[in-house]
Amino acid sequence: MKYTELTREQLEKEYSVIRARYDRLCEEKLSLNLTRGKPEKKQLDLSNDMYTALNNCDFEMDGIDVRNYGLLDGLPSCKRLFSDILGCSPDEIIIGGNSSLNLMYDLIAKAYTNGLLHSERPWCKEEKIKFLCPVPGYDRHFNISISFGMECIPVPLHEDGPDMDIVEELVKDPLVKGMWCTPKYSNPDGFIYSSEVRQRIASLDTAAPDFALIWDNAYAVHCFDGTLPEFPDMIGECRKAGHPDMIYEFASLSKVTFAGSGIAAVASSKDNLTHIRKILTFQTIGFEKVAQYLHVKFLKDKETILKHMEKHAAIMKPKFDAVQNALETELGSLGIADWTHPKGGYFVSLYAMHGTAKRINTLCADAGVAMTKAGATYPHGYDPDDSNLRIAPSYPELPDVIKAMQVLCVSVRLAALELLLGKLGG
Amino acid sequence: MKYTELTREQLEKEYSVIRARYDRLCEEKLSLNLTRGKPEKKQLDLSNDMYTALNNCDFEMDGIDVRNYGLLDGLPSCKRLFSDILGCSPDEIIIGGNSSLNLMYDLIAKAYTNGLLHSERPWCKEEKIKFLCPVPGYDRHFNISISFGMECIPVPLHEDGPDMDIVEELVKDPLVKGMWCTPKYSNPDGFIYSSEVRQRIASLDTAAPDFALIWDNAYAVHCFDGTLPEFPDMIGECRKAGHPDMIYEFASLSKVTFAGSGIAAVASSKDNLTHIRKILTFQTIGFEKVAQYLHVKFLKDKETILKHMEKHAAIMKPKFDAVQNALETELGSLGIADWTHPKGGYFVSLYAMHGTAKRINTLCADAGVAMTKAGATYPHGYDPDDSNLRIAPSYPELPDVIKAMQVLCVSVRLAALELLLGKLGG
């Protein structure tokens, strides 16, 4: 039964059934949360041994006392670990602190105050800066741009990546200085950029000489269903395409070990890193190396990491299955919603009837289920269709995910019925 | 025997004696280092238990799972630890990462890109920014200013703090936006700002509404000789003087536990912190909390910290004594050098005959002793007197400090003799 094909009478009848279901769920006085992509406690427990089962703890690695000052770039062994994950060379990597977001923020901040390698002047001296924002996307990416006063230009994100016809047009504008990308298991859709799209990105002929492709490889090893797909080193792809200095890749172990206490890294061309290092040397004597040391001892190499990620997957998959089951069972036949089917990352993207996402947010909140704010996946929180909702099922335990999904699905139905019956806003 | 009172003949004789001593030292093919203020291995060993003797390690503190995302400000218990040290309130503190230098850099960066609380516009939109630099001072402070293109204005630092007559004049210029201070055991002199100077600083009537007093309390508990002097909370002093938002205080546990892996904090008025938090929220989801947790478990409170610092003192004091002994024995009667007698911090400041510091640097280097570059304690490395040298005896072991000091003292004498004999530059 498609809602859009129902008569008004049928709609009214359905409305009273769904409204009653919703009211009963409200009576349960729930307090559930499907907002942020946070690992649950059991996932964090997987890495406790990093601290609690220390053996041969001499605080020495690569011939360096990891407790003392120094080594701006990070431990060589830690660079090798990241190069193992990303496929680039260890000398194309700088290890940062605990947050890849912070590294991205810092890169943009340095572009503003000092300029990037090929900048004609610091970005703060430019009249205006524009940045391409594939949508839906990660709110914290867009918000970095907004915090620096950039104009965010939304670009549709398809299943194979950003709409490249549009991107290729937009980068002819010299004020367009970069693009935010989460190329693997995109946030929130869970899409993986195709080989063709990656090629077109690497080959982009940008008017800005200092165009910054922010390649946030946040979920490089975060597959929870099946085997990790091949994903060639994008730094090498850009170099081959003649744009070695266009790309800044970011990666993080936050969702491998401890969410708040992982290790982040930036990878880029050697020339870019030389430029960054020059500015970085004013900023710090060095990032935290004990955590780097502990991560290298615990995670060892890519093979060990992938085995470790299987343990995460075993906890994550049932929750993502529960999300898919709920959506299919509750909404599969109604013609009022689409959603994505990711095999990695931390999110599922739900597209409800246009004009109902905010209402669904409110309905869920009133029933005790916190959802990521409708629109959050668009710059300035503005989803022109008022349709996209991000589902983040990782943090709650499975029974809570199941219950929260009931509330969400009933809310999606109720909002759709309200819209079709002209009751929306009530 | 004062060198300046010797006849040319006596000088020539002394020169051949000292030159011979210097040549003999060169033959030893030394490789010693008195440059950076780094703790030695035994000092680092004092804190190994923070990681290796974890008990009841549940990764929970203040009701928070310290492994997961969140808590932009840092753990409440960690704020209390810092408030215990600094004397301000815990809600006047934000806990940062491993580096107070990075926090200072970030503050200035935010002033440039967004402006401080009372800024009329971001600093990058100002024609020019000037910053007061008490000299000699910490090169990394000055270099932050330089990296943002500020004009650094040197101000003489006396035993009781910066020359306040000069400072009070200079801050009438609205382009003067701040001042770098290391108020306790200043780097490199080891001076402690007097109560009167602190009062005059707190009462500064600055033309710039967003004047930033950078109060780098780097050595808050770092006394190696006698008892830690009282040092009232400067945030409270500024508030009482009617300038609550002028001060940004920084502190660090780097030289309490692990130099590269301590915890840093910024303390300021609640209004300033609210402003900083608004920008910080774009930068990161939160700083590393496991390290905060481990530090709180290990250091507990001020009393425990002070006891811990006594162990550092027991390692540090013999080295500082060796420095003083060497200077007194070798240079005490010659009238060619003065030096400071700090009871805390990491440095001793040596003032050689004007015009000889660079030469002493070269002589030391040629004899295998690395010294901090002459001039490094002045903005742009320019010491107009070419006199000041920073001695950092903490990192080498005691016998090496003694040997390195021999080389330094002989070099100071040789350079003075060269100058007096008109041989300098040879």
Image (spheres, coloured by chain):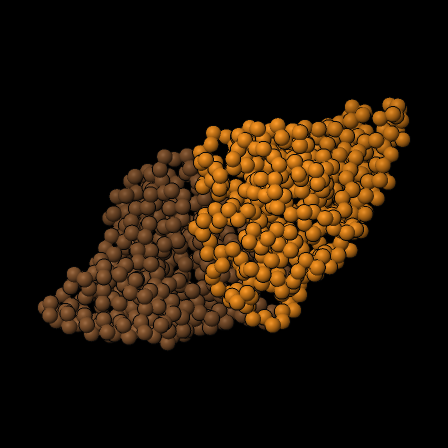
Chain colours: A brown, B orange
Q: Where residue A30 appears, x then y in whole percent? A: 36, 72
**In the picture, residue A190 is in which quadrant?**
bottom left
Horizontal and vertical percent for residue B302?
A: 68, 58
- Which residue lies at the image location 88% right of the left edge and 23% below the top edge? B7
- Residue A291, quarter of the rendered image: bottom right
Pick the quarter of the image with the C terminus of chain B.
Answer: top right
| Location of residue A251 in the rendering, given as x and y in whole percent from the top left corner | 44, 57
Residue drawn where x is 81% and y is 31% of the image: B336
Which residue is depicted at the point 47% across and 29% down? B127
Q: Nearer the viewer, residue A119 or B79?
A: B79
Residue nearest the viewer, comparing A239 with B231: B231
Q: Position of residue A84 (x, y in %)?
A: 47, 60
**Relative horizontal placement of residue A208, taking residue B79 as reference (left or right):** left
Instruction: Judge whether B213 appears above or below A390 on screen.
Output: above
**Which residue occupies the extreme bottom position in the image?**
A399
Q: Image check: A52 left or right of A250?
A: right
Describe residue B276's horizontal placement relative to residue B353 as left or right. Answer: left
Q: Where the N terminus of chain B falls, by quadrant? A: top right
**Across the whole image, how many numbered discs are drawn on residues?**
0
Using residue A301 as the reference point, say whether residue A387 is left or right of it.
Answer: left
Q: Residue at x 64, y 67 (%)?
A: B52
> Would residue B227 be seen by someone viewing this image from the given angle?
yes
- Would you say residue B390 is visible in this rendering? no
